[in-house]
Amino acid sequence: MHIAVLGCGNMGTALIEGLTKTYGDIWQIRAYDMDRSVVEKLGPNVTFEEPKQWFEKDVPDMVLLAVKPQVMKQALSVFTKTGSKTIWVSIAAGVTIETLESLLPSSSKI
């Protein structure tokens, strides 16, 4: 399974660490944070990759949105195309499904 994580602050990092601890290398994890060194500290099973590249090859099965609510619009602006089977999950407080629908391409599964 491929998972992509947008935002590696406290919550994003905790989720990635939980996944790698529980599942090891079964999941391929690509992650992005403005501070690349945060991603690089997450271990060998986590690859730093720019979000605009996520849908060019090996489309993720899931994208976990772990950015602060106030930067969600800017963070999602790079996604002009997505995979039709990709599931989008947000842990951003107060960001509604309707908001995500308005920010992502219409084929997105939220």
Image: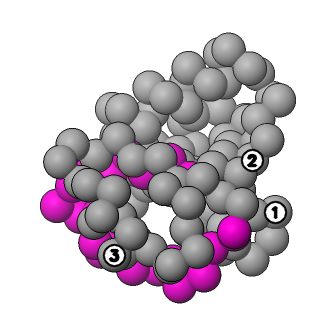
Magenta residues, start to end: 63-84
Question: Was residue 48 drawn as part of the magenta stretch in this picture?
Answer: no
Out of 4 and 32, give the one closest to the viewer: 4
Comes first in the chain, label 2 or label 1 = 2
Residue beneath the point at 57% across and 44% down: 40
Amino acid at circle 1: Asp
Across and down, in percent, residue 45 comes to 73, 36
Residue occupied by mark 1: 58
What is the CA distance from the residue labelled 3 to the residue labelled 1? 25 Å
**Which of marks 1 and 3 precedes in the sequence?**
1
**Residue 105 can be seen, yes or no:** yes
Residue that numbered label 2 is attached to = 2
Earlier residue among tags 2 and 3: 2
- Residue at the spot x=27%, y=66% of the render? 99
Q: Is residue 51 left or right of residue 54?
A: left
Residue located beneath label 3 in the image: 102
Viewer-closest of 46 and 89: 89
Asked whether the residues under the numbered discs 2 and 1 touch, taking CB atoms below 8 Å apart as contact, a structural biologist would say yes
Front disc: 3 or 1: 3
- Where does the image place residue 35, in percent across and percent down from the top left? 40, 55
